[in-house]
Image (spheres, rainbow, N blue to C red):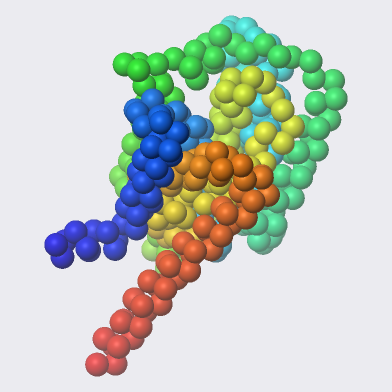
Amino acid sequence: MKKVKKYIKENNWVWAAVGAFLLWFVMGISSGRLNLESFLSNAYTAAFLAILAFGQMLVVTSGRGAIDLSIPGVLTLMAFVSMSIINGENKNVPLAILVIVVLGAVIGFLNSVMVIYLQIPAIIATMAMNYILTTAALLINKNFSIFAIAPVIQKLVTTRIFGVQLMIFLIVLLAVGFWFLLNRTSYGKSLLAVGQNREAAKLAGIKVNRVEMLTYVFSSILAAFGGMLTTARVGGALLGMGDSYTLETVASIVVGGTLISGGKANVPGTLVGCLFLGLIVTAMQIMGFSVGAQNIAKGALIIIVLLLSSGDAVEKKVKRTVEKTA
């Protein structure tokens, strides 16, 4: 029993998993759709959020209160760019992937330069970048007239294997990859060290600036891929299609156990957090909540989780202080 309590205390994302199950169960009972298909439907929606949330998780883990607010702009702009290049043809997909990866890397690099070398707080720097990207998408939209989705991307988003959407399998594989990245590579270990104590990481010989730069690059590349895949899900490139993801990426990783102060990331928790948040949004939509009310609820959720996690941090700090003075 003590081991179970200890595990739950160290992995607070378990509560999000319990909450997700209860939400699915209650909604299923109330709507008469308590079945595997309803669960998979919510998991499928959460998969698109997870792509972006993993990037946000890396940025937040880097510490200093960093949050990438350029994710919505990257997603929206890359949706327009990828559709313009692909133009509904499978043969153009490789070129589109190359272009959005390069552009995503450049955007991430510019974000990191503003944060690292110009010493602009991450929230301000990425917010400014988001305005620039949103304006660029607005300019492209004026003469945008492409509505065809490449069949290969459409299949990627809609294909099922043994009744389960392929996207769900791909996100699980992506999660495994990120777990390996954080726990088995020098980059991942360095990122955790930087987030915990920057100065100590420098003294340990870690190239802090390089680690932080890669973090922003990864985040933007993931957002770029998210934009391309989302076009197939929503049926095209739309202005503002990434706006809701700003709050949702932060909420999902915080609920999933990633420390907002940095230094600790939780990959399985991020997956659970995305599912939990998706179910909450679905529940609010069923109850007829407006978009504004949904944002208020998501914001309140973040505050509650932060209060709970800060309470645990204070408790641990007091215990350490008492042990030192004893």
Q: Is residue 191 above or below residue 285?
A: below
**Residue occupying image coordinates x 47% and y 50%:** 253
- Quarter of the image where one finds residue 244: top right
**Residue occupying image coordinates x 31% and y 57%:** 11
Residue lying at the far left of the rendered structure: 1
**Residue occupying image coordinates x 63% and y 13%:** 149
Residue 321 position, x and y percent, is 33, 86
Between 118 and 5, the one nearer to me in the picture: 5
Residue 294 position, x and y percent, is 61, 48
Residue 238 position, x and y percent, is 72, 28
Residue 157 visible in this rendered orientation of the protein: yes
Between 23 and 247, the one nearer to me in the picture: 23
- Point out the image quarter for the N terminus: bottom left
- Point out the image quarter for the C terminus: bottom left
Q: Is residue 323 above or below residue 236?
A: below
Residue 130 position, x and y percent, is 71, 44
Drawn side of residue 284 relative to residue 319, left or right: right
Count of residue discs: 0
**Residue occupying image coordinates x 31% and y 81%:** 320
Residue 194 visible in this rendered orientation of the protein: no
Residue lying at the far bottom of the rendered structure: 326
